[in-house]
Amino acid sequence: MATLKELAARGDKFTGGHRACAGCGATIVARQALLAAGKHPVVAGCATGCLEVVSTIYPYTAWNVPFVHSAFENSAATVSGAEAAYRSLKRQGKVADEIRFIAFGGDGGTYDIGIQSLSGAMERGHNMLYICYDNQAYMNTGIQRSSATPRGGHTTTSPAGKKQPGKLQFRKNLTEIIAAHNIPYVAQSVVGNWSDFTRKVEKALDKGGPAFIDVLQPCRLGWGYPPELTAEIGRLAVETNFWPLYEVEDGKHKLNYTPKERKPITDWLFQQERFRHLKGPEHQGLIDEIQRDVDQRWEALQKRCAL
Amino acid sequence: MSKLVSAQTGNEAMAYAMKQVNPDVVAAYPITPATEIVQIFAQYVADGDVKTEFVAVESEHSAMSACIGSAAAGARTMTGTSSQGLALMYEMCYIAAGLRLPIVMADVNRALSAPINIHCDHSDTMGMRDAGWIHLFSENAQEAYDNMIQAVRIAEHADVQLPTLVTTDGFIISHGMENVEHLADERVQKFIGEYQPQYSILNVGKPITVGALNLQDYYFEHRRALADAQAAALPVIKQIGEEFGKESGRAYGLVEGYQLDDAEYAVVALGSTCGTAKVVIDSLRAKGEKAGLLKIRSFRPFPKDEVVQALKKVKFAAVLDRSDTLGGYGGPVFTEVRSALYGEASKPPVAGFIYGLGGREIDMEMIEELFRLMKSGEVKPDSVQYLGVRE
Ligand SMILES: Cc1ncc(C[n+]2csc(CCOP(=O)(O)OP(=O)(O)O)c2C)c(N)n1
């Protein structure tokens, strides 16, 4: 794996000057991913969403690699087309470089409206890495729920109200859905652990074939916390076992990190405005349910890793 | 040189043209009545007859998305679809045009649901008439073949750089067997030339951003440039049609007049109905009637000047539409033709006829009746009516 010093020497491929919020996690994902990919020439794509919107306001661009955006639900299909073109032109001797392809999408563009496009591209076996920057809601349109939003989370379409405590459903496990495609590499990573993410991006690109990384990405605006806490809140999600760091390589699950002592989920929840309404004793039942869900998912994951 | 002729359906002719074009990438999804195009092409790939990378996507939305990625990567890119498949692509069709990507698409015109129907009308491609694509209609399988080859040149032309749609009438052309004359492979290749993309996202040494967000300060200029490209396509389509004529003996223009020079009454139509109209016109002419046809080949860009010129001297024109605007005044062809004529000093009265939805048959008697109605003065100028429907 590249050292921090090496990464720093590579020069940013996702540059500053974009219009993301202070403390934005999505731009950290893009910057670190492209740094990690740095030894290869890279073509990137992105779904409509915060990352694309803040980074490509014409006539400016933050992308110092070739970049394509077409729509919201099809980052995977669009990049799969570019990758197919590459294979065709390479075969014909019209392209010399050994190019890698990375598609980015938010959780809305990935878990929800883009899941078909992603599933199709993974199943077809394109040589591309799909990175979901998972901030657990549609942030670009003003914080609406997605199937990645955790139970109890307040969003503008799953608002906490007098009768309902935020989102009613638990979040979908997309990492396992993509793992079920039996592709060479699937992983979960987090903003706040650069070495885990860098290693996974490198590995995904080195393995070749379709790969998927779901990166939990704290969003200071949508989650409601001071901008300097982005990395910390990401790490807390790992320390509470809410977001385990693991990978599925050639079908084999492997846990990359086990907290010394699992922190209670409330440590993570109550750092964030979106869960603040759950603080009262009347919601203890729901908190217990959320904790049980975290623990059950963790156990299920451990079993998969033991196989 | 001996002629290369074979009996082919419209779908076979289109797939064969695609084989001879030998694109870098095809991304497509099956749908009746265009499925065969995809199947036949997949077989060419499986047999190694083409160098194409075939992307068997999971939906038409992804087909057009993949085409966009491919074309942005500087690859010569083609696809094919119909009806619901095209409707699922609409979002991406607008984007393909806005990004100025010269993708070529074969569409077999089929009615849109509901009710679900697999037969011919033009509602599917008319649904994207404002998407920025060049839109060429074909009268028969021969034209479908010829149009597919010309479409590559038109789309990629430096003054144009627009995605291009070639259509055939579902089942009538797509499944009808005809003698189709081909150019030899080398001549097709020579005619279309090697594709030299202006930009490519595979050029990692010179990174570009494709699909940037445009706000109030730039969007309008880019859309205006798109309109200019459509206008610029008019002479290009004509010039390439003439060049193709030199190559094949079959020259093409933006419109085709049939017995129109001295015609008193004319029908205006698209696609296979033009073939039927020509037979009717021949028989009317044999009886001394001055009947004519204006066939519109290029619906986008709409050749306003050619249409005005062609209809200038007729006493009445019946405009046939195989799709409806539902709440608009007349079908899409009627509204275009009438609008084109409106400011002209010398113009014929026109009436609109919506016919053939969902594959409803249009026969020679119906077209003959149109000429009779025009001549007898029984059609009110500017009226719009439905033809061949039970009221
Ligand atoms: C087909 C379509 N539906 C809806 C939208 C509106 N839209 C744009 S971005 C977005 C949400 C993006 O959410 P996500 O993918 O989570 O990314 P984020 O904004 O959080 O970065 C929505 C709903 C759209 N652009 N296209």
Image (spheres, grey):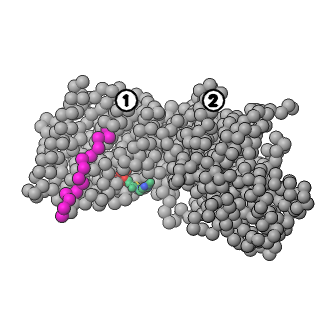
Position in image of residue B57 (x %, y %) = 50, 38
Identify the disc placed on residue B44: 2
The residue at label 2 has a CB less than 8 Å from ligand 1? no
Instruction: Tell me the magenta residue range.
Output: A162-175
Figure check: A222 above or below A88: below
Instruction: Identify the amino acid type marked 2.
Output: Tyr
Specify whether A49 is left or right of B375.
left
Tag 2–tag 1 contact (CB < 8 Å)? no
What residue is rendered at 22% in x and 57% in y? A166
What residue is rendered at 67% in x and 40% in y? B175
Q: Report the residue that reaches farthest toward the left.
A: A281
Asked if residue B118 shows in the view, the reply is yes
Instruction: Identify the amino acid type marked 1.
Output: Asn
Does the magenta run of residues contain B321? no
Residue position for label 1: A182
Specify whether B328 is left or right of A29.
right
